[in-house]
Amino acid sequence: MTDRDRTPSRWDRLRERLVRVQDPRDPDASMGLLRQVTDQALEPGYTRAAARSQPRRRWLSAIALVLVGVLLAITVQQTTASAPEAEAERDQVLERVTEAEAQVAQLRADIATEQDAIEAIRAEALGSEADLTATVAELEAGTGRTSVVGPGVVVVATDGQGGQGRVVDLDLQQLVNGLWSCQAEAVAVNGQRITSRSSIRIAGEAITVNYVSITPPYRVEAIGDPSMLPGCLRGSSAGAWWSFLEQSYGVGFDVTRANNLELPADDGLAVREGRRLR
């Protein structure tokens, strides 16, 4: 009797069941577990909590939008309400500026009238004393009290490239002092007469002369000997200063002769104290 013809006993069937139960390689069971992990990545508790919080988030977003809208409406209302007041204040400021300008113009006209009267009284007092008249005229021209006309030189200075090539107040001070040292009789910078009371300073981004802002190019006029001034200026310490600026920073420095220059008087000069002569 062979093994093929032998009828399976009860022990054989029990052993076969045990082998089936212990076999871990069940494809259906493995695929089912993977599908469960993929479909239920989050715990059911988390899913339910997220679903409950969605309406709450929507309410919060709606409230935030309402608050933003209210704030914008209040801002627009305040801006609209204050616009007429701002316009009125602006008109008042412009009116005050106009009135101040008119007052300044009137004061200048009054000063000119008084100066003409003073000139007439002085001419009458001097009478025929030609020497004294000439002396007074020379002193007034030298101090900047009156305008002067004559030959001289014109120096034009311009900024170079970059921030370091910018002409500053110290550069113009050096130039003016150099012209005085070369026996210039009168000097003006951009139409501002230089006197013993003048100042050349930097104010913010601009240079001021006699407290008046000037901008480049800087035109420095000097009355004096036109045949001597250019060479003297180039050979002075001021000329060496500006030669360094030319070579190092590309600053422009041009000196030309002029046959007929007219330099204005310094409007800031006025008689503050006086003593009657006997």
Image (cartoon, grey):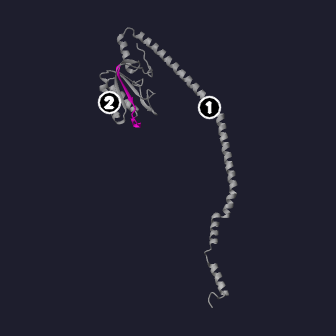
Q: Is residue 55 left or right of residue 253?
A: right
Q: Give me the residue at 56% from left, 23% from top.
A: 98
Q: Quadrant of the C terminus?
A: top left
Viewer-side residue, 238 vs 160: 160
Q: Position of residue 194 (x, y in %)?
A: 40, 24
Residue 87 or residue 254, whichever sits in front: 254
* Horizontal side, residue 74 vs residue 181: left or right: right
Residue for badge 2? 239
- Where is mark 1, residue-wise? 86
Q: For the residues marked 1 and 2, what is the alpha-carbon distance in whole angstroms?
A: 54 Å
**What are the residue bounds of the magenta stretch?**
151-165
Between 260 and 38, the one lying in front of the other is: 38
User: Which numbered disc, 1 or 2, marks the residue that appears first in the sequence?
Assistant: 1
> Disc 1 on helix, strand or loop?
helix
Outermost residue, bottom side:
1
Residue in the image at 67% along x and 48% along y: 64
User: Considering depth in this image, is 38 or 151 the residue closer to the camera?
Assistant: 38
